[in-house]
Amino acid sequence: FFFIKDGPRFIPWVNQISGRNAGKHISTVLVRMWDTLGGFIRTQALVSLIDAVFIGAGLLILGVPLAPVLAILTFIGGFIPFIGAFVAGALAVMVALVANGFTTAVIVLGLILAVQQIEGNVLQPILQSRSMKLHAVVVLLSVTAGGSVFGIVGAFLAVPTAAVAAVLFRYLSEQIDERSADSLPDADAAEAARAEDDETDSAGDELESRSGSSPDHV
C-alpha cells in the first residue's frame, strides 16, 4: 500500500542517480507502472467488496448469525490470494452448519461457490482488464500460467506483472514511433535533395547532348 501511495516520491531520487535523459524515461515508465499497480489494488478492493456484499446479503436472507462479521472477513480475505477466500467461506459454512443446520450450510456453500466462480471467471478479469488496459483473455491466461508455474503466489502476482510488462512494451513502442516520425522529415528532405540533384544532372546531360549534336558553323 505504502509503496503504491508514496512511489512517485522516489522519482527525484531516480533522476539524480540516472541523469537527465535516462531519468526522464525511467521516471515516465515508473509513474505509469505505479498507476497500473494502483489500479490493480483498487480493482482487488472493488471485487472483494462485491463478494462481501453478495455473500453477506445471502447470509442475512438465510438467517445465519454473525452475517456482517462474516461479510467483513470475506472482504479482508479477498486480499489474500485463494487462502483468504477459502478461510472466509469455510467459516461461513461452519457457522451456518452449527447455527442453522445441514441444509442451510449446503445452501451457503453453494452461494459462496457461485459468487467466487462468477468473480474469478467473469467479474475480476473484466474489471482488471479495464483498469490495467489488458484484454480479459490476457488476464485469464496470466493467472493460469502464473498459478501453474509458481502456485498461489504466482496466480496472484501474474496480472500486475503482465500489466507492468505491457506498460514497458507500450512505452518502448511509443519511443520507436516518435523516433521514426522524427526521422521522416530528414528522410523526405534527403529524398527531395536527391531528386533535385538527379533532375539537375539530367538537365545537364540533355544540354550536353544537344550541344554535341548541333552542327558547327564557320
Image (tube, rainbow, N blue to C red):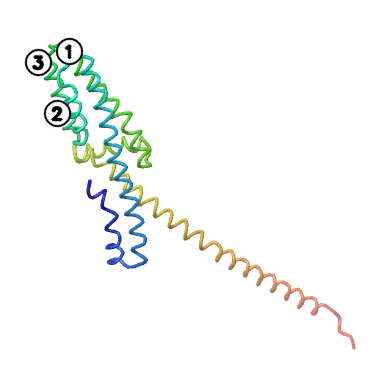
Identify the mark nearer the N-term, 1 or 2: 2
Horizontal and vertical percent position of residue 65: 15, 18
Kind of residue sitting beneath label 1: Thr
Residue ID at (31%, 64%) = 15
Which residue position is annotated with label 2?
87
Q: Earlier in the sequence, mark 2 or mark 3?
A: 2
Image quadrant containing the C terminus: bottom right
Residue 200, numbered circle: none
Looking at this view, is 75 or 189 the one in front? 75
Q: Toward the viewer: 145 or 37? A: 37
Residue 98 has which mark?
A: 3
Q: Counting other residues with Cα less than 10 Å from the Cα at mark 1, is it few (<14), some (14-19), or many (20 or more)?
A: many
Side of 51 where 186 appears, left or right: right
Q: Tell me: 25 left or right of 63.
A: right
Residue 56's place in the image compared with 155, above or below, is above
Q: Residue at x 32, y 68 (%)?
A: 19
Residue 62's place in the image compared with 214, above or below, is: above
Q: Residues within 10 Å of mark 3 (few under 14, many from 20)?
A: few
Distance in Å between CA atoms under marks 1 and 2 = 18 Å
Asked where in the image residue 89 lies, by quadrant, the reply is top left
Residue hosting label 1: 104
Q: Are marks 2 and 3 in contact (CB under 8 Å)?
A: no
Q: Which three-letter amino acid code belongs to the residue tagged 3?
A: Val
Mark 1 lies on a secondary structure that is helix
In percent of width and height, residue 1 lies at 23, 45
- Tell me the SS state at disc 2: helix
Q: Residue furthest right?
A: 218
* Residue 56: percent from left, percent from top: 22, 22
